[in-house]
Structure formats: structure tokens, C-alpha cells
């Protein structure tokens, strides 16, 4: 792990930041309607950057408080975004983009980024005021937000038990309360928690994962190319005069020089079985290491596996899997598997030419246990196998004469390398 960076917001700094981020009026001069994701921890920042950016562009705006309802920045479909942009908003601020989920390949257009941040590993500092049991009794428990990049990042780490939460705030709270030794969380969520709890001290380190790097942009419908150019020009101006840095300084990772992608993750996966621990799952779901042959397993890049090679699949089941994907997966992962508010399932970020951090069995196991996000594990085993066949075909693997079964998909420890697919 990279050297931990001490993170602290004391009372004076927090008070100053809270003053800076005082609530803005729900409406300003009538003009371009700007929406934010109200559930996002960066929503306050997004509103203030919007106000300053459009002012610099000379464009009056109306900040729409409820244009996207209660949604956060995870799991919003392109259809929903287009409906919001056509009905309630002209621009969406705080749209998350990354190399693994850039929402490309459709008719939304985007500004340059105004905040580059990422997912981090969070622990209590030695001076933190939590109950202190996290590092001992729960030393291998890692909290993460359910059905988010944080969950994927946590799954790449070996020897851990996962404590999955519904919100980023409760993910941080798990560390504060000693229910987890550390958490994987988007850094703005740590900032937002620190603003609300200025006496709390944390140590943070960039998470080691390809899924960790994200930045925030403005999203527009394709017809708004001229407005997008005005916004980009304004962001350039705010960058040049230092105003954008001032606005985003508290929300930016403390050390921008530390890479959040480390080669050590290549074989750093683990095996886990999933069980719900409350009646209202997925509010709290825990992953517990097990070797039981009767448990539903997630096998991810276990270097001890002997490896069973690339499992065969039929073209007909890949075609069937395509239809299942469209109805169950495309909302978040994109109709072309390009990634929207969830990672891409095609291309070098998902299936590189070499040195994949995911195995075929690992992908299948994760998918069959946790997806779709709104109905995890609810499809038939063979339906999951057919979707896996479609993913393999989409990443360059050739169809064969034998049908891919759930057992064969689950058993494959072959790295998902598109370059070796033929």
C-alpha cells in the first residue's frame, strides 16, 4: 500500500469551508437550468462550481434542486438522463467520468473536468475519536458502498471481509464506529463527512485499482455544443486565474503525485461467499471467506488455482445473452458495454491484451452474485452463463461447439485477456 496520507479538517478550516459552501438559493436569474445529483457527496461543490463557471461564461442559470429526484451518481440510465435533460435540466453538473466508465458512444457531450479525484482507502488516524476496535477486532473488515466502483475495488484486495453499505456516508461511519478497520470510498465523500464532523481525523491513501480514478464534468445534450464550448472557455479562465483551484482545493486528493493504480493488484484477489446479515439487504451485506463447496463463490484471480482454460460457448447463447444484457445490464454499463455510471465491460480497461486483473470465473462469480444491482443474484444460473458468453464474444473470444454452463464459467481461472482470445 502507498504511504498513508494523514487527512484532517480541524474546526477552523471546516467552519471556513462551510461558510464558503453555504446553501445557494434554489433559483437564480432565469436562464440555463443546471441540475446536480442530490445524493452525491460532491453536490455542494457541484453547485458552487456551476455558479462560478456560468458566471464566468456570462450565462445566467437556474439551479434546479430536484431535477434528478433523489438519485445519486450511481445507477442512472442514459434514458433517464436524456429525459431529465429534455424536461427539467439543460445541463447536469457533477457527472462522473473515468477511463472505465466514460459514457461515450452516445449523444451526450461533456465539458472538460473540473475535479480530478478518486477512490481511497480510509482509516482512523491515531488521534481519531472512534471506539478504536477497527484495527484489532475487525482488522480485516473493509467497508464499501454496495454496487459501486468501491465494491469492485474492495473485491480486488486479498484477505478481507466486506461490509457493504447503501451510502458513502455510512461507509465512512463504519470505520468511525469500529465496524470496519478501513473503507474504500470516493474521496469527496471523506471531505463531506469531515465537513459534517470536523473533529474526526482520518488517514487516506489512493486505492490501488484501475477503477479508482474519476473526474467530474458538466454533461449536455448533443444540441448544446455551443454552450459546452462557453463552459469549457470559462473553466479555462477559472483555471488560469486560480479560482477553480480555490473552489476545489479541499475536495482534491492531498497528494496528486501518488498513482492510484499499482501493479501489485494483478494477483491480489480473494475468494468469498456472500450472505445477507439483515432483513433489509443490501443495507448490510458481508462477504466472508469460505471454502465450502455448497456456498456461492466469487473466485477472482486466485493465483493458486490450476486454471481450466477458456471455457467454450455457443453463438446462440451469446445471442441470447445479448438480449438479457440489454434488459438487465445496459442501464448502468451501456448498450455498447462502454460504461455509463458503472464500469465498461468491453475494451482494454475490462479485458486488456495481457496481465488482466480479472479472471473469467471471477467475473462470472461477481456478476452472478451481485448483479443486476437492483436485483442481485435473481437471474437463473444459465442466464448468467449466457450473459458471460456474450461478454466473452464482445471481447474477442470466438464461439465454439460446446455450451457454456454456469459450473464451467465459475470454474475458469483464466485471465480475461482479449489479446489472447482467438
Image: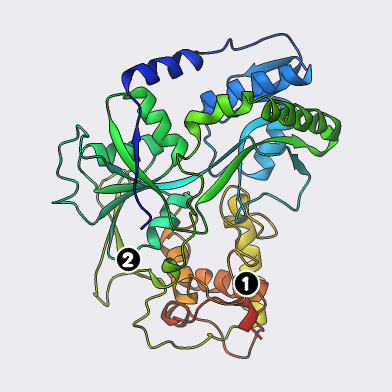
Tell me where residue 240 sits by quadrant. Answer: top right
386 vs 230: above or below: below
Left or right, 194 with respect to 63, comes to: left
Question: Which of 334 and 203 lies nearest the eye of the viewer?
Answer: 203
User: Which is closer to the viewer, label 2 or label 1?
Assistant: 2
User: Is 293 located above or below residue 422 in the figure?
Assistant: above
- Which quarter of the rendering shows the N terminus? bottom left
Secondary structure, mark 1, is: helix
Q: Residues within 10 Å of mark 2 (few under 14, many from 20)?
A: some
Q: Residue at x 50, y 76 (%)?
A: 360
Q: Quadrant of residue 52?
A: top right
Residue 14's tag is none
Q: CA distance from mark 2 to mark 1?
A: 28 Å
Q: Check residue 158 in the rendering and tell me which mark sits there, or answer none.
A: 2
Q: Residue at x 68, y 42 (%)?
A: 79
- Secondary-structure class at tag 2: loop
Kindly identify the residue that appears in the image at 37 percent across and 30 percent down: 193
Q: Residue at label 1?
A: 390
Nearest the viewer among 364 and 207 is 207
Question: Looking at the picture, how far across and down is residue 261, in whole percent?
Answer: 49, 59
Can residue 69 be spotted in the picture?
no
> Which part of the image, by quadrant, shows the C terminus?
bottom right
Judge by depth and name the residue closer to the eye, 62 or 335.
62
**Relative to 296, 402 lies left or right:** right
Q: How many marks?
A: 2
Q: Residues within 10 Å of mark 1 (few under 14, many from 20)?
A: many
Residue 255, given in percent of the width and then of the height, sits at: 46, 43
Amino acid at each position: 500500500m502507498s504511504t498513508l496520507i494523514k487527512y484532517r479538517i480541524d474546526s477552523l478550516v471546516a467552519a471556513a469551508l462551510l461558510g464558503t459552501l453555504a446553501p445557494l438559493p434554489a433559483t437564480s436569474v432565469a436562464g440555463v437550468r443546471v441540475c446536480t445529483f442530490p445524493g452525491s457527496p460532491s453536490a455542494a461543490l457541484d453547485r458552487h462550481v456551476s455558479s462560478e463557471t456560468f458566471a464566468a461564461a456570462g450565462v445566467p442559470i437556474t439551479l434546479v434542486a430536484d431535477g434528478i429526484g433523489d438519485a445519486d451518481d450511481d445507477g442512472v440510465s442514459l434514458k433517464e438522463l436524456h429525459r431529465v435533460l429534455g424536461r427539467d435540466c439543460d445541463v447536469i453538473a457533477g457527472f462522473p467520468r473515468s477511463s472505465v466508465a466514460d459514457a461515450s458512444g452516445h449523444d451526450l457531450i461533456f465539458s472538460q473536468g473540473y475535479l480530478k479525484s478518486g477512490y481511497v482507502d480510509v482509516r482512523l488516524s491515531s488521534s481519531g475519536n472512534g471506539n478504536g476496535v477497527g484495527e484489532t477486532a475487525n482488522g480485516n473488515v473493509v467497508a464499501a458502498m454496495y454496487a459501486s466502483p468501491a465494491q469492485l475495488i474492495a473485491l480486488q484486495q486479498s484477505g478481507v471481509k466486506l461490509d457493504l453499505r447503501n451510502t458513502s456516508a455510512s461507509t465512512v461511519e463504519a470505520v468511525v464506529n469500529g465496524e470496519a478497520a478501513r473503507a474504500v470510498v470516493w474521496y469527496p465523500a471523506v471531505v463531506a463527512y469531515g465537513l459534517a464532523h470536523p473533529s474526526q481525523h482520518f488517514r487516506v491513501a489512493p486505492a490501488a485499482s484501475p477503477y479508482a480514478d474519476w473526474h467530474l464534468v458538466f454533461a449536455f445534450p448533443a444540441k448544446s455544443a455551443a454552450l459546452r464550448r462557453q463552459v469549457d472557455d470559462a473553466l479555462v479562465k477559472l483555471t488560469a486565474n486560480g479560482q477553480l483551484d480555490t473552489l476545489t482545493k479541499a475536495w482534491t486528493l492531498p497528494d496528486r503525485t501518488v498513482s492510484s493504480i499499482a501493479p501489485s493488484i494483478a494477483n491480489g484477489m480473494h475468494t468469498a461467499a456472500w450472505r445477507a446479515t439483515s432483513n433489509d439487504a443490501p443495507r448490510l451485506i458481508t462477504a466472508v471467506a469460505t471454502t465450502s463447496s455448497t456456498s456461492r463463490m466469487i473466485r477472482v484471480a486466485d493465483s493458486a488455482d490450476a486454471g481450466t482454460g477458456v471455457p467454450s460457448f455457443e453463438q446462440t447463447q451469446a445471442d441470447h445473452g445479448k438480449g438479457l444484457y440489454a434488459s438487465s445490464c445496459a442501464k448502468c454499463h451501456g448498450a455498447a458495454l462502454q460504461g455509463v455510471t458503472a464500469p465498461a465491460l468491453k475494451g482494454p480497461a475490462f479485458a486488456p491484451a495481457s496481465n488482466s486483473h480479472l479472471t473469467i470465473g471471477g467475473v462470472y462469480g461477481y456478476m452472478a452474485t451481485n448483479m443486476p444491482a437492483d436485483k442481485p443474484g435473481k437471474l437463473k444460473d444459465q442466464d448468467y452463463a449466457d450473459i458471460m458468453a456474450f461478454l466473452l464474444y464482445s471481447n474477442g473470444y470466438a464461439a465454439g461447439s460446446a455450451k457454456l454452463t454456469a459450473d464451467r464459467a465459475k470454474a475458469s481461472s483464466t485471465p480475461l485477456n482479449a489479446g489472447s482470445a482467438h
